[in-house]
Image (cartoon, helix red, strand yellow):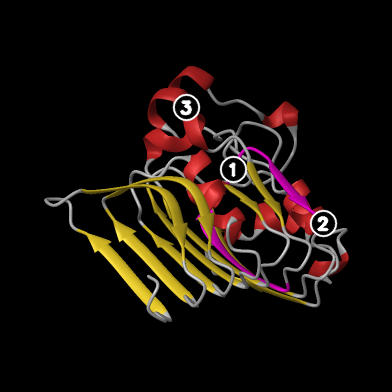
């Protein structure tokens, strides 16, 4: 990469499976780097002083230490695009002083929930634009995002609650809260009917972390309306 290269795209198919092992990954000219597919990336040190855009697209075999070295070695990085297939990998922990635009897309499986969706942490003091798509996590730490102004969220619950009325506190089939009118057989309802599932995840800290934004775009699926609006009803970003 020492011949004035400006843009590089690396892709490895599942059949190929490429192992990238190097003590030093460096280029003084590279501005845009895309890595996708079945790469086993192992780097001792990264120095990409001109890199402005980094895309990690379904990189299956990059662990957190190597991912961190890659991002830390890009001191002027502005655009970071991450797509995780399965459990959150690179998109679970973002820490960069320079990035301004962050796009994270995680395509989850039900088996990933308890193992991998306990915490999502973003710390990016220069960030102004965030596009985040995933299933809801148990907790969030959105730190030092004071410059963030534009956010797009596409967050989904693990189990749909569209047909369940959480405002009805009794257990009967009527849309009222009269506990004395609860004449249902709970055992029969458990067998034949749909119980109110516990909602996994809490977006409270996510909302607190983006409270300074001026524009919020929510996808139709974002926490199914009720849950998100109940969480952020007191936040200025939702007013």
Q: Dot 1: what SS? A: loop
In the rendered image, which quarter is residue 225 located in? bottom right
Real-space CA distance between mark 3 and mark 2, rounded to the nearest whole angstrom: 47 Å
Residue beneath the point at 30% across and 65% down: 10
Magenta run includes residue 5: no
Residue that mark 2 sits on:
144
Quadrant where the C terminus sits is bottom right
Q: Which mark is residue 189?
A: 3
Q: Nearer the viewer, residue 22 or 125?
A: 22
Residue neighbourhood size for the residue with mark 2, other residues' Cα within 10 Å, grouped as few (<14), some (14–19), many (≥20): some
Farthest residue to the left: give it.
15
Give coordinates of residue 12: x percent, y percent: 22, 58
Q: Dot 3: what SS? A: helix
> Is 184 rendered above or below residue 117?
above
Real-space CA distance between mark 1 and mark 3, rounded to the nearest whole angstrom: 29 Å
Q: Which of 7 and 119 is in front in this view?
A: 7
Left of 29 or right of it: where is 146?
right
Residue beneath the point at 65% across and 70% down: 76
Which range is magenta? 128-144
- Upstream in sequence: badge 1 or badge 2: 1
In this rendering, does residue 162 appear at all?
A: no
Picture mark count: 3
Residue beneath the point at 88% across and 67% down: 236
Residue that mark 1 sits on:
137
Q: Which of 47 and 223 is in front in this view?
A: 47
- Upstream in sequence: badge 3 or badge 2: 2
- Upstream in sequence: badge 1 or badge 3: 1
Residue beneath the point at 76% across and 47% down: 204
- Which dot, 1 or 2, sits closer to the camera? 2
Dominant secondary-structure state across the stretch colored magenta: strand
């Amino acid at each position: 990469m020492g011949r004035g290269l400006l843009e590089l795209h690396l892709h490895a198919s599942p059949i190929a499976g490429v192992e990238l092992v190097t003590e030093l990954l460096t280029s003084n000219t590279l501005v845009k780097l895309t890595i996708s597919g079945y790469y086993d990336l192992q780097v001792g040190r990264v120095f990409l002083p001109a890199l402005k855009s980094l895309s990690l697209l379904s990189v299956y075999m990059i662990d957190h230490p190597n991912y961190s070295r890659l991002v830390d070695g890009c001191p002027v990085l502005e655009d970071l695009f991450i797509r995780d297939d399965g459990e959150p990998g690179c998109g679970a922990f973002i820490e960069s002083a320079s990035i301004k635009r962050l796009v994270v897309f995680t395509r989850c499986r039900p088996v990933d929930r308890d193992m991998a969706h306990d915490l999502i942490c973003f710390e990016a003091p220069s960030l102004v634009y965030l596009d985040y798509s995933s299933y809801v996590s148990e907790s969030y730490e959105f730190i030092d995002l004071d410059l963030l102004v534009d956010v797009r969220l596409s967050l989904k619950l693990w189990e749909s609650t569209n047909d369940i009325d959480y405002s009805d506190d009794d257990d009967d089939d009527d849309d009222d809260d009269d506990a004395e009118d609860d004449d249902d057989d709970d055992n029969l309802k458990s067998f034949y009917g749909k119980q109110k599932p516990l909602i996994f995840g809490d977006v409270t800290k996510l909302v607190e972390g983006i409270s300074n934004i001026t524009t919020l775009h929510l996808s139709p699926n974002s926490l199914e309306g009720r849950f998100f609006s109940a969480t952020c009803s007191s936040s200025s970003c939702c007013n």
